[in-house]
Amino acid sequence: MLDNRFSAWNGAIAETIDAVGKSNFANRIEAALKTIVDFDILMVFAYSGKEKPVCCYHNMVAARARTVIDAYTSGPYLLDPFYGAATDPNVTGVIRLREMAPDQFRNSEYYRRHYVLTGIRDEIGIVCRPAGCTGLVISFTRPVSGPAFGRRDLSTVRAAEPMIGTLARRHWHNGVETNLPDDRAVEKSGDAINETLNRMTDGILTPREIEITSLVLRGHSSGSISRRLSIAEGTVKIHRKNIYQKLGISSQSELFARFITQLSGR
């Protein structure tokens, strides 16, 4: 069985190497990964600073892509843990959603209003950094009707990552197929979420309150925020109460709705 999989991987990766620089490269990457791990969706997103991400490839029918791809790139991507990983220069290699998501991610409005609608149960990504691109993520998922990825799956993907990452960097270098501006010309300063919140609140919130609002939207609990910012949890709760009072809202649902409205009009 192992010999059969190894043979299938070798054949598929040879075809992937031959496809570097060609239009069928992403299809070959998908075929190679399917010889070593079972998955449903495969998608490739390229990120350049705070620019809207570009989907370089996906294997979905149009109806599902409207939810998984189009709705995502309209703005909610800013709250996606994979966006955070792609734009963090310290992150490379294999990452898994459940291991990097904030502690209250599944209770966040982003999860409820976007991620649940995708029908995705679990997701693994390979983060690489082609020249001229902040980050590129090759991610593959399993549906809610299937099992989550296990330790053996992760171990297998990590073993394959050096080859997949190297080929991806060679193929998607200098903006090839991404339609993104060269990363060297992209404005790096500032945080996209914080900037959006500043516009949305028009100076009502203090810098600390903006910072806490950003973490709340991402799915961090008060305890998680207190640890990240090195302040007392009680202080975080006071800040959250003041934020809601200043904005005239009473729930994270209202906060998320305002945030998405601001994004859609930017």
Image (cartoon, helix red, strand yellow):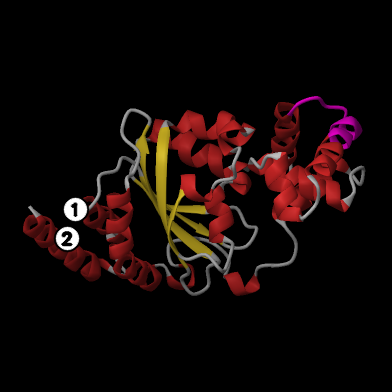
For the residue pair 62 and 221, the one nearer the viewer reads as: 221
Residue labelled with disc 2: 9
Crowding near pointer 2: few (<14 within 10 Å), some, many (20+)?
some
CA separation in Å, label 1 and label 2? 6 Å
Residue 172, above or below 99: below
Mark closest to the chain's N terminus, 1 or 2: 2
Q: Residue at x 56, y 53 (%)?
A: 83
- Estimate the x, y position of residue 50 in percent, counting from the top left: 65, 58
Q: Is residue 185 left or right of residue 123?
A: right
Callout 1: SS: loop
Quarter of the view holding residue 150: top left
Q: Residue at x 92, y 42 (%)?
A: 204
Q: Residue at x 53, y 68 (%)?
A: 133
The reply to whether residue 188 is in sight is yes
Q: Are marks 1 and 2 in contact (CB under 8 Å)?
A: yes
- Estimate the x, y position of residue 64 in percent, counting from the top left: 41, 33
The reply to whether residue 263 is in sight is no
Q: Is residue 125 left or right of residue 23?
A: right
Residue labelled with disc 1: 35
Magenta part, dominant SS: helix
Number of callouts in the render?
2
Q: Residue at x 27, y 51 (%)?
A: 152
Q: Look at label 1 and name its amino acid.
A: Thr
Crowding near pointer 1: few (<14 within 10 Å), some, many (20+)?
some
Callout 2: SS: helix
- Estimate the x, y position of residue 141 in percent, counting from the top left: 37, 43
Quarter of the view holding residue 137: bottom left
Quarter of the view holding residue 192: bottom right
Q: Look at label 2 and name its amino acid.
A: Trp
Residues in magenta, as a range: 241-251
